[in-house]
Image (cartoon, rainbow, N blue to C red):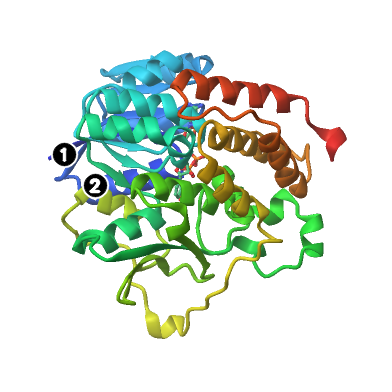
Amino acid sequence: MKTIGILGSTGSIGTQSLDIMGWFPEDFRVEILTANDNAALLAEQTKRFSPRLIAIANEAKYAELKAMLPDYRGTILCGEEGLLAAAAEKTDMMIHGISGMAGLAPLLATLDAGNDVAFANKESLVTAGHLVMAKVKEKNIAFLPVDSEHSAVFQCLQGGRSGLKKLVLTASGGPFFNRTPEEMETITPEMALKHPTWNMGAKVTIDSSTMMNKGLEVIEAHWLFDCPYDRIDVLIQPQSVIHSMVCFEDGSFIGHLGKADMRIPIQYALTYPERRANPVEELDFAALGKIDFYAPKKEIFPLMTLAYEVGRAGGTLPAVMNAANETLVYKFLEKQISYKDIHRIVAETVENHDNIGDPSLAEILNAVEETKARLKGIGTDAH
Ligand code: NDP
């Protein structure tokens, strides 16, 4: 029996992780759950899985949460401190499914506690990859990727890295990969939220449509697999059945294929190195018929190109790019800026930043706060 904590249990990664807990009640015991705002769902999950500790980051929701759980005997924490305390609880595996940079401090807290991690929160690796990976090494932590592309690469490398030439991260290309630059002028949140193959949270769905998500994943892959940027390629494959590939010096490619269902990579991180039968439908190749491939068009996805440049530059720049993107994606979702403004303003912000090499956590957080403050006032007049 493995004990499991889920940071961000009410999100897309969190709820799918709980599906897996429901499939294998003999193998996993849920001990810790956390959310930000969604007290109702956290309460429902608590009634079903009886964790020993839960935390809600938004303090204003504490009373509501407590009132919904009159018979609960476990611990209920709240606020930033409560979230960090929950992350620092000892557990066999902590699933990290918090979205955005809010995930960085809880990640560092759970690593400090020596917990193995099933890792989805790419933004924290993009923001502070050198600090996170140093801690993973220092504490000898199993840091297992949940993101489908990184899980795919991880699975493809189970035979070893000897002769590894490059990683090929695949991308669905989102809803806009075959559009012209002119057609990109009028994208609305409703259009960008319609992902053709994956069902994910709002922020990651918008990032998927701009392919900033792939750019962040390139940086994530750089850190996870200690791979230089010029050995990480991106290939659009709209059916989302090849989740990524590795290419070896002898011309061999090994790929990971399957249904576009996040529960496959989440489960692999939890049962690694074993595999278990589950209710996920098997991929039917004959019904699929074909798999298409396209190179991503730079003029449609400038944010991905920018992410490569920023990843190579390193220092505080990735944190600044990520903070700018995160702020602007939410402004776009709230219809305060246009779709094209996301790239324009992220690029300007990166351009104007005085980069700091090999930054400390304080320098990273400071750069992030400065970026957010600079962009705070940007809104409807830019639209
Ligand atoms: P969601 O938006 O669906 O869920 C986010 C979770 O984090 C929720 O539980 C939310 O709580 C919690 N949360 C949000 N902000 C805070 C905060 N400030 N403090 C504490 N908790 C917070 O996101 P996803 O599940 O889609 O994504 C999670 C991470 O996984 C992201 O980094 C994403 O890039 C990555 N990822 C997601 C994939 C997917 O298929 N969804 C695929 C690959 C990677 P509440 O519900 O209460 O707001």
The image position of residue 376, as x and y in percent, is: 72, 25
41 or 214, nearer to the observer: 214
Count neighbours of disc 1 (C-alpha within 10 A) and say few if under 14, some if 14 to 19, many if 20 or more: some
Q: Which mark is residue 172?
A: none
Determine which quarter of the picture holds residue 121.
top left
Q: Quadrant of the N terminus?
A: top left
Q: Which mark is residue 270?
A: 2
Which amino acid type is shown beneath numbered disc 2? Answer: Leu
- Using residue 210 as the reference point, say whether residue 101 is left or right of it: left
**What is the distance, in whole Å, between disc 1 and disc 2 at their CAs?**
9 Å
Residue 14 or residue 299, whichever sits in front: 299
Disc 1 marks which amino acid? Lys
Identified at 36% across, 73% down, the residue is 283
Of residues 286 and 146, the one nearer the viewer is 146
Q: Which mark is residue 2?
A: 1
**On the rendered image, what quadrant is the C terminus found in?**
top right
Q: Residue at image x 64%, y 53%?
A: 210
Q: Can residue 70 be seen from the camera position used here?
A: no
10 Å crowding of disc 2: few (<14), some (14-19), many (20+): many
- Measuring from the top left, give residue 89's x and y in whole percent: 26, 22
What is the total number of numbered labels drawn onto the structure image?
A: 2
Marks 1 and 2 in Cβ contact (< 8 Å): yes
Give the mark nearest the N terminus, 1 or 2: 1
Element class at badge 2: helix
- Res 116 seen here: yes
Q: Residue at x 29, y 56 (%)?
A: 154
Give percent across and percent down for residue 199: 50, 55
Q: Tell me if residue 332 comes above or below residue 23 in the rendering.
A: above
